Image: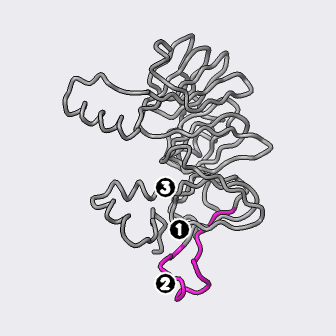
Amino acid sequence: MDKKNEFEVIESLESKDGTKIEILQYKELKGSSDIGTAESLYFANQSGVRLKMVHIKISNSHVRIEPGALYYMKGQLEIRASTGGGFMKGLARMMVSGESFFVNEIHGTGDIYLEPTFGHFFLHEVTKEEGGIIVDKTLFYGGTTGLDITAMMQKNVSSALFGGEGFFQTLIKGEGIAILYSPVPNEEIIKYELTGDKLSVDGNFALMRSEKINFRAEKSSKSWIATSVSGEGLLQTFEGNGFVWVAPTQGVYEKLKKIGGFRDLSGPTGSMNTKTKSN
């Protein structure tokens, strides 16, 4: 890309087939001719908010991206519609999760740039040794060849009805690099390792988990009476052997979006209550 000094690479990973993925961050936006937009950009620059863009470099390979994610590309590249693993997988994806039957794949050699955003991205290398990961179906943005992306139904009624994540999530398996959209900066994501113990979260700010981790919604106390007076309600519970990635600041940002958010955060502490329901 020309004018590389306008960008900084904040994260980079390379897959076994040589595909390189970079998260590019604009150092500053200063080209607006509209005074209102210029004012917004000034405060964004002062507060450290930066525009980001995913850059993918492939050589005789292919990547899968979500519909509408492509910004532009350069090289000997071709967009192909794929079932994402066969007719039955495409049909299951359409019937089960409501996604399209076909997925977008870009084949060839060249550079691919995905839609810029002021949001955040998270790169994760999926390996057969560590196993697959389960993420909310809105987080998957793209991935390299070797990944198997399927819709997974929650394993129990409590997690489906009260877990705050819906009936279906995305299961990513195989070997490769997954590009995930994150609600918080990468630095604010905490990775917990569970070795037979339990992690309980009051809200749905757990971004993803290892495939082997069991997930359910359960009472914060042994009895419903104790649960009702504790003020905690139902908790997202993760148990087993593997990893859970959580974003504790997600609830803070959601509160700050609301009118009076700063005032609420300055008062007595309470549940961030992102979405986990009790009815």
How crowded is the residue under tag 1: few (<14 C-alpha within 10 Å), some, or many (20+)? many
- Considering only order in the chain, which callout, 3 or 1, is on the residue closer to the N terminus? 1
Q: Dividing the picture into quarters, in which one does residue 198 lie?
A: bottom right
Which residue carries the number 1 mark?
202
Which residue carries the number 3 mark?
249
Asked if disc 2 and disc 1 are in contact, CB closer than 8 Å, the reply is no
Residue 65 visible, this orientation: yes
- Considering only order in the chain, which callout, 2 or 3, is on the residue closer to the N terminus? 2
- Residue 29, horizontal then vertical, whole percent: 35, 26
Query: Residue type at mark 2?
Result: Ser
Colour mode of the rendering? one colour
The residues tagged by marks 2 and 1 sit, at their Cα atoms, a distance apart of: 14 Å
Query: Residue type at mark 3?
Result: Thr
Query: Residue type at mark 1?
Result: Asp
* Residue drawn at point x = 58 percent, y = 30 percent: 64
Which residue carries the number 2 mark?
228
Task: Point out the frontmost of discs 3 and 2.
Answer: 3
**Numbered disc total:** 3
Q: Dividing the picture into quarters, in which one does residue 128 lie?
A: top right
* Residue drawn at point x = 61 percent, y = 60 percent: 154
The residues tagged by marks 1 and 3 sit, at their Cα atoms, a distance apart of: 13 Å
Q: Is residue 223 magenta?
A: yes
The answer to whether residue 187 is above or below residue 102 is: below
- Which residue is farthest front? 46
Please state the extent of the stretch shown in magenta in the rendering: 214-234
The answer to whether residue 118 is above or below residue 163 is: above
The residues tagged by marks 3 and 2 sit, at their Cα atoms, a distance apart of: 25 Å
